[in-house]
Amino acid sequence: MNAVPPADSAIAAGTPREEMAGALTGWFGRAARSLPWRRDPSPYRVWIAEVMLQQTTVAACVPRFERFIGRFPDARSLADASLEEVLAEWEGLGYYNRARNLWKAARLIVERHGGDLPSGVTELRALPGIGDYTAGAIRSIAFDLPAGMVDANIRRVLGRVEGIESSVTDAERRVFQTCLSLSAAGSPRLVNQALMELGSLVCLPRDPLCGECPLSAFCRARQEGRFDRWHGSVPREKRTLQVEEVCVTAALEDRWLLSRPCDGRWRGMWEFPRRRLDGAGAFAAAVRDLLERDFGVCPSGVHYRGSLRYRVTVHDTRLHVLSAWLPHEPGCASRSWRLVLPGELDSLPLPSPMRRIARSLSPGCADALDPGALKEPCER
C-alpha cells in the first residue's frame, strides 16, 4: 500500500474544500518525508508510530520504531510479551505510561477484535492510551476513512487558514470539524498526513514559510499578516526543581539492590532505591533511613558518588547518588526488590537516569556522574 502518491495525482478542483484537499495532496506527494510507518501504513504500525510521536521527535522515533516493530511485529506478539519486556524495549523514550497502555491495549485488541485494530473511533477510544487525536490518526491514515484530529501542528495550520482564534470557546471543535471536512473532501490518509507535515515543515510557529505553503491562497493569517494570533503554541509551564536521593548499593557477592516502584511514572520498571528529600543536605542519613525503613537492613558504610539531573514534564530533578555496603540481604522489606549481578542490568528495564547510574558503575566508564555537588567522606 503506497502512502504517498505521485505529485500529479491531486484531487480535481471543485468546492473550496476539494481545492484545499487537492492542494494538500499534491504538495504532500512532492514534499513528504519518507518514514517507515508511511511506507507501510498498517493499523498496527500507525498506532505504534502515533503513540511514539506523542512525546518523541521524528528523528529519534524512526530507529526506535523500527526496533520496536522488529521485536513486536503485531498486536498478538505485543500482547503475548510481559510488561517488563515491553518496558525494556521502550527504555529511553520516556513517558513510560505510553508503553504500559500499549501493552494493555494490545491485550484488549486480541481479546475483543481478534488481534486487528478496529476502524471505528468509538472502538478505538475504548482502548487504553488512545485519545481523540490518535483515534483520528489511525482511522484516517491506516483505513483511509474521514476523521478529524487536532494536535499543535494541525491547530496552527487550520487556525491560521480559517482564522480561528485560539481564545474562542469552540476553537478546538472548529479545528476538528475543519479537519474532518477536508479529509472527507479528498483522501483522508493523504490530507491528514499533509496537514501534519505542513505544520511540522512549513507552517512554523515563528517565521512560517508561506512561499512553500500549498494553502497560502486560502490563508487568512497570511492575508492579514497576523501569524502571532494563530501560532498554535501552548505557554510552557514554569519548571520547578525537586531533589531526590538515590542509593546505589552492593550486597554480598557484588550484587546490586534494585527495587520496583508500585506506582508513579516508573512503575513496572526497576530502579536503584530512591527517595525524595524534603530538605537540603544529610544525604548519608537519608540513605540509611531509606534502607532501614524500606528494606530492613542497616548499611555498614555510605559514600557519596556524584549526581545527575533529568527532566520530567515541569520538574528538573537532581539525583544525588551514594554507594552503600550491606552486611546481609534485605529483611522485612516494604517494597519489591531483587539482587542482581552487574551483567544482569542490561536485560532489565531501567529508566534513563537509572541506566546512566548503572553505566557509571562499570570500571573506566566515560559516562561518569557529576562530582560537583556536596560530598560526604567515605565511612566504610
Image (tube, rainbow, N blue to C red):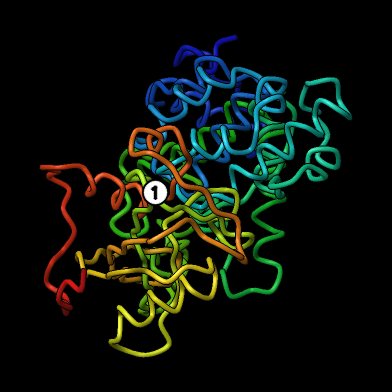
Q: Which residue is mark 1?
A: 203
SS state under label 1:
loop
Closer to us: 102 or 88:
88
The reply to whether residue 20 is in sight is no
Closer to us: 124 or 214:
124
Question: Residue at left 35%, top 71%?
Answer: 316
Closer to us: 44 or 31:
44
Residue 187: x %, y % from top left: 65, 24
Vertical placement of residue 53 versus 190, above or below: below
Q: Amino acid at mark 1?
A: Cys
- Quadrant (top left, top right, bottom left, bottom right) of the C terminus: bottom left
- Is 132 placed left or right of 70 in the picture? right
Residue 295: x %, y % from top left: 53, 66
Residue 314: x %, y % from top left: 43, 71
Dot 1: few (<14), some (14–19), or many (≥20) neighbours within 10 Å?
Answer: many
| Number of numbered discs overlaid on the protein picture | 1
**Residue at the extreme top of the image, as rendered:** 1
Question: Residue at left 83%, top 44%?
Answer: 126
The reply to whether residue 46 is in sight is yes
Q: Classify residue 248 by image quadrant.
A: bottom left
- Is 274 placed left or right of 309 in the picture? right
Q: Classify residue 320 by image quadrant.
A: bottom left
**Residue at the extreme bottom of the image, as rendered:** 279
- Quadrant (top left, top right, bottom left, bottom right) of the N terminus: top right
Closer to us: 170 or 314:
314
- Is 247 placed left or right of 77 in the picture? left
Question: Residue at left 49%, top 33%?
Answer: 89
Vertical placement of residue 270 versus 315, above or below: above
Vertical placement of residue 297 versus 138, above or below: below
